[in-house]
């Protein structure tokens, strides 16, 4: 019987938008529903709930476009929230192929200023290597949708009173 390699998935991606805009795309339910999930999946806005604070949560359901009976829920708890800079949380695996139920999967997302844009760093796991590779593909496909959202969605400005 072969030993399974367990690894952390690590990704970096540059976005041509400031950290506060990229961070908001991860914490605003409207925006999250627009970009999250790999190609072939969508996230109904009605399934998205975000409470961006330590002890808060990140909940949504990815739905397969061709067969809506195929779903993949995300139910994470935030342990660290540093607005516009860092989100850290975990999800306990349930029914994930190759991962023992109850395994705590940690997700760390860093939003680092880089010129006029943002360098996004993601670390997630522990996963078996094959699942880590599939997860990286899913994140990269999601990032393509996020990049399009950041380019096409006008930045919301908050009115200030003098």
Image: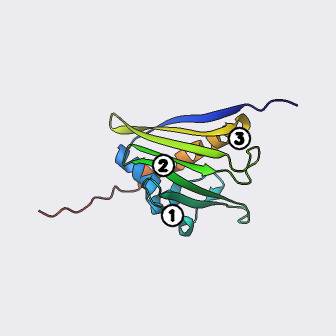
Left or right for 69, reference 143: right
Left or right for 136, reference 89: right
Looking at the rendered image, the disc whose residue lies closer to the viewer, 1 or 2, is: 2
Q: Residues within 10 Å of mark 3 (few under 14, many from 20)?
A: some
Which image quadrant: the N terminus? Answer: top right
Disc 1 element: strand
Q: Residues within 10 Å of mark 2 (few under 14, many from 20)?
A: some
Disc 3 element: helix
Residues at marks 3 and 2, CA–CA distance in whole angstroms: 24 Å
Left or right for 151, reference 76: left
Return the residue found at the far right: 1
Q: Position of residue 153 (x, y in %)?
A: 40, 56
- Residue carrying label 1: 49
Q: Earlier in the sequence, mark 3 or mark 2?
A: 2
Q: Earlier in the sequence, mark 1 or mark 3?
A: 1
- Residue carrying label 2: 79
Circles 1 and 2 in contact, beta carbons < 8 Å = no
The answer to whether residue 151 is seen in the rendering is no
């Amino acid at each position: 019987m072969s030993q399974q390699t367990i690894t952390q998935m690590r990704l970096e991606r540059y976005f041509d938008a400031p950290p506060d805009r990229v961070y908001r795309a991860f914490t605003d339910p409207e925006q999250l529903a627009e970009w999250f999930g790999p190609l072939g999946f969508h996230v109904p806005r009605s399934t998205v709930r975000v409470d961006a604070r330590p002890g808060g949560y990140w909940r949504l359901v990815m739905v397969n476009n061709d067969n809506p009976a195929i779903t993949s829920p995300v139910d994470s708890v935030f342990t660290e929230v540093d607005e516009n800079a860092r989100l850290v949380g975990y999800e306990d695996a349930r029914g994930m192929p190759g991962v023992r139920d109850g395994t705590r999967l940690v997700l760390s997302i860093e939003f680092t200023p880089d010129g006029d844009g943002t360098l996004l760093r993601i670390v997630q796991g522990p996963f078996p290597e094959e699942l880590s590779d599939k997860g990286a593909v899913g994140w990269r496909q999601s990032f393509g949708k996020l990049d399009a959202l950041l380019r096409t969605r006008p930045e919301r400005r908050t009115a200030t009173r003098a």
